[in-house]
Amino acid sequence: AAASNVEMAPLAQNAGGFSRSDPNAILNECREIDQGIDEIERNINQLRMLQDRSLNDADTSAGSATSRQLDSLSSETMGMYRALTDRVRLVKSNSESKQPKNTAQVGRVDRRLKQAIQNYQQVESAFRKKTQDQMARQYRIVRPDASEQEVQAAVEDTSQGAQVFQQALMQSDRRGQARAVLSAVQDRHAAIQKIEQQIIELAQLFQDLDTLVVQQEEQVVQIEQKGEEVVENLDKGNVELGGAVKSARGARRKKWICLGICGMCHP
């Protein structure tokens, strides 16, 4: 429900920008974005608690209550980040955002959303590290004689990690415990993959917040350059036209002089 509030909130924008009938449209939009960031910050605090609980949960499967809650809240929060990023980009790309009464608030929500993105990246990175540390401990239970290199290969390489654990399962004297560890590690690998995908997307959203503004500035420069070229061409055309008019006048004058001379030659 929280995500839908952010995503479905009226934007008051159309193809031409924010509603001209509301002089405070930009400030009102910034206020709503602020509220959305407040919601994200609350979600991040809740995500931290769920992540810690999942690390201590005996049931590490994707179907466990903690995993479902964590997955749902994580997806909801990412949806909020996407929606708020789009809204901030729309605000920043609007010419009204450059007005003195709006610049401070627009800059503030932009910086605040970027900080919120970085905060979530840090939370996800910390959770990934804790998850990998837990996987390493579990691997050593199954293979106490494993080298540090073998442990790292099992933990870090999500594509081959399960295979490494399978081999450990065959070599272990504790088959029952090894199977339980293998199942838990497979679930952790899937969780780590999702974390890494979200970290990458968060980095892209951070960049997207500036992309539209940069593109807009480039377009303004191109328009100015084309405008200068048009003026230059017009000036050049006027010079050429002036020369042509002058030449035409000169030709007509010469024509009348010639006619006058011819008239004088005939009695």
Image (cartoon, grey):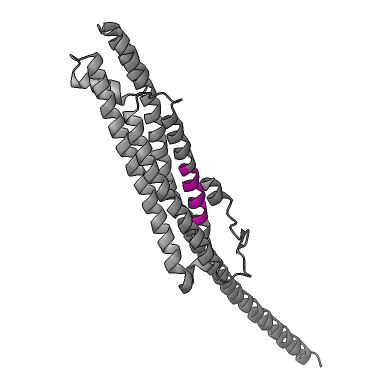
Split into 4 quadrants, where in the image is the N terminus?
Answer: top right
At horizontal 43% and vertical 54% (from top left) the residue drawn is: 38
**Residue 189 at x, y = what percent?**
37, 25
Residue 150 position (above or below residue 245): above
In the image, is residue 82 part of the stretch drawn in magenta? yes
**Is residue 206 shown to the viewer in this render?**
no
Q: Nearer the viewer, residue 226 or 236?
A: 226
Q: Quadrant of residue 143?
A: top left
Q: Quadrant of residue 67?
A: top left
- Horizontal placement of 161 versus 69: left or right? left
Residue 94 position (above or below residue 159): below
**Is residue 252 shown to the viewer in this render?**
yes
**Residue 196 at x, y = what percent?**
38, 34
At horizontal 32% and vertical 17% (from top left) the residue drawn is: 181
Q: Nearer the viewer, residue 45 or 143?
A: 45
- Horizontal placement of 169 versus 212: left or right? left
Start-end of magenta stretch: 77-88
At horizontal 30% and vertical 12% (from top left) the residue drawn is: 178
- Horizontal placement of 64 versus 1: left or right? left
Q: Quadrant of residue 245?
A: bottom right
**Residue 120 at x, y = what percent?**
37, 45
Helix, strand or loop: magenta stretch: helix
**Residue 82 at x, y = what percent?**
49, 46
Split into 4 quadrants, where in the image is the C terminus?
Answer: bottom right
